[in-house]
Image (tube, rainbow, N blue to C red):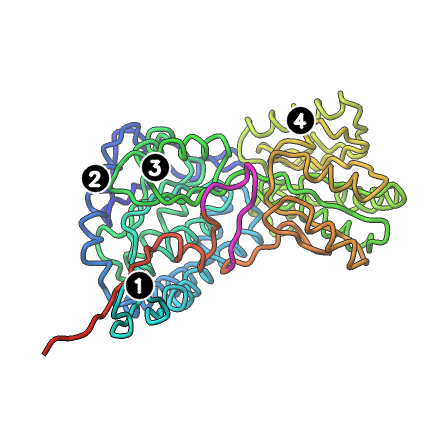
Amino acid sequence: MKKMIIGGHESESDAQILIVNPSDLQPVDSVSYTNSTKEIKEAVDMASEAFTKYSIMPLASKAEMLKKAAELIQHDKEQLAVLLAKESGKPISDARTEISRAISVFTNSAEEVKTAIEGKTYRPDAYSYPTDNDKRIVLEIREPLGVIGAILPFNFPANSFAHKVAPNLALGNTVIVKPSSQTPLTAIELAKLMYRAGFPQGTISVVVGNAEKIGTAMATDKRISGITFTGSTKTGNAIAALAYNKKLMLELGGSDPFIVFEDADLERAARVGVRARFEYAGQNCNAAKRFIVHERVYDEFTRRFIGLAGSLRVGNALDESTEMGPLINNSAVQEAKSIVKDTVDKGGKLLLNRETVNAGQGYFMGPVVIGDADIKSRAMQEETFAPVAPIFKFKIKEEAIEAANSSQYGLQAAIFTNDISTALDAAKRIKVGAVLINDSTRLRWDTLPFGGLKDSSIGEREGIRSTAIAFSEAKLISLGAWSH
């Protein structure tokens, strides 16, 4: 049984939950689970006490511990990837990639934070008031915020942990992690490795438990200065309503449009589109969730897309040949089927239906492609965390842009065209956080800002540099004339 990590100590609660492999429904491990706020309060106590000394530790020392943690993760990479694949259902090849990304985030955080919080100097002598400005030097420095609450999604248990923990520890903040109750095991193992790397007691905790109670406790505890969250828009809005006095970095839902113009490279668009939609069974916030295709190339694109999607190997996440694994649980499967039914009921045509796939006893659902999707159907409006690809047909550019902007979300968008004018015009008019031209919506640079507009984000953007700025405070220091 895995235990929670409270300030560096393993903590066993009265309750336990069983973590089940979504590929075969076999137990992976059990983990301590709390239905109270006792553990979170204890973690905040330790994090607050640790912050006093840890925050003033030299940045070089913090950087060395992060690099050591990266080395330890690298040493256990295969073991961690297998654990991640088992608890999340992510294909083993993708699980290895996620662990590699987490290692990179730790390493880059040790380097990037150095320049992100360098501070600056001002010229007070440029201003006539206050007087005697020519005798002053004004500096701006950045200081760590305090205790940070980090709430992780189920779909990136390692990389999301790295993004929310590494930059904050580099700054001098202490962090309390609440992993998804579906995928808590990887976070616990990573926290153990970080303490082996030398991080002081109290700097990191991993509390597994009731999401509403822990989220509410984090949002209302005045000793927690900031919250970084990745998850649903509904939950994010609830946290924001309670945590109005804290720094917030809330990465929420996405329904990313994938637009194919008539002059696009259809072979590339179809190949990139299939990966962007069906990677990890579509359970990525920046997956391509809505395909918007010009009527002149609709048939050819659809033919290529269906051919590639129909040949995807669906199976156990630990099978090296698997290209798409299971959904996270049975509720996700049933929700996906409901979205398919709604989209077909609204006039969509089932062009590919692998809804029932013979891949074992897990929560499997094969790729589904729905043509002539109505713009008001659930698949074209909601965040579909499942391997369902609706395709909408458009005639003119304005219609494509209108369709792209019709969703409540605004995370990322992809545009495929060989006309730079078309690409740039559409990029300016689509209301999202990032536009990828002739590339996948899944593209993300871990160091650069990541986030969206509308219901896709609240507060600051995530990324090593932007996290460093968001969860540090600016302070002015004025050096006046010295008396002798």
Q: Which residue is mark 3?
A: 208
Determine contact: label 4, label 2, CB under 8 Å: no
Is residue 23 visible in the rendered structure shown here? no
In the picture, measured across the screen, residue 118 lies left or right of residue 24, that is left
Q: Is residue 452 magenta?
A: yes
* Disc assigned to residue 39: none
Compared to residue 258, the image places residue 361 above or below, namely above
Measured in 3D between alpha carbons, the distance from the residue under mark 2 to the one under mark 3, in whole angstroms, is 13 Å
Nearer the camera: disc 2 or disc 3: 2
Magenta stretch: give its range: 448-459
2 or 3: tag closer to the N-terminus: 2
Determine contact: label 1, label 3, CB under 8 Å: no
Measured in 3D between alpha carbons, the distance from the residue under mark 1 to the one under mark 3, in whole angstroms, is 54 Å
In percent of width and height, residue 114 lies at 37, 68
Q: Name which residue type carries label 3.
A: Val
SS type, badge 2: helix
Task: Sort mark 4 into few (<14), some (14-19) or many (20+) by Cα contacts within 10 Å.
Answer: some
Q: Name which residue type carries label 1.
A: Tyr
SS type, badge 3: loop
In percent of width and height, residue 323 lies at 65, 48
Residue placed farthest to the right in the image?
296
Where residue 265 sits, quadrant-wise, is bottom right
Nearer the camera: disc 3 or disc 4: 4
Q: Which residue is mark 4?
A: 339
In percent of width and height, residue 373 lies at 77, 31
Q: Name which residue type carries label 2.
A: Glu
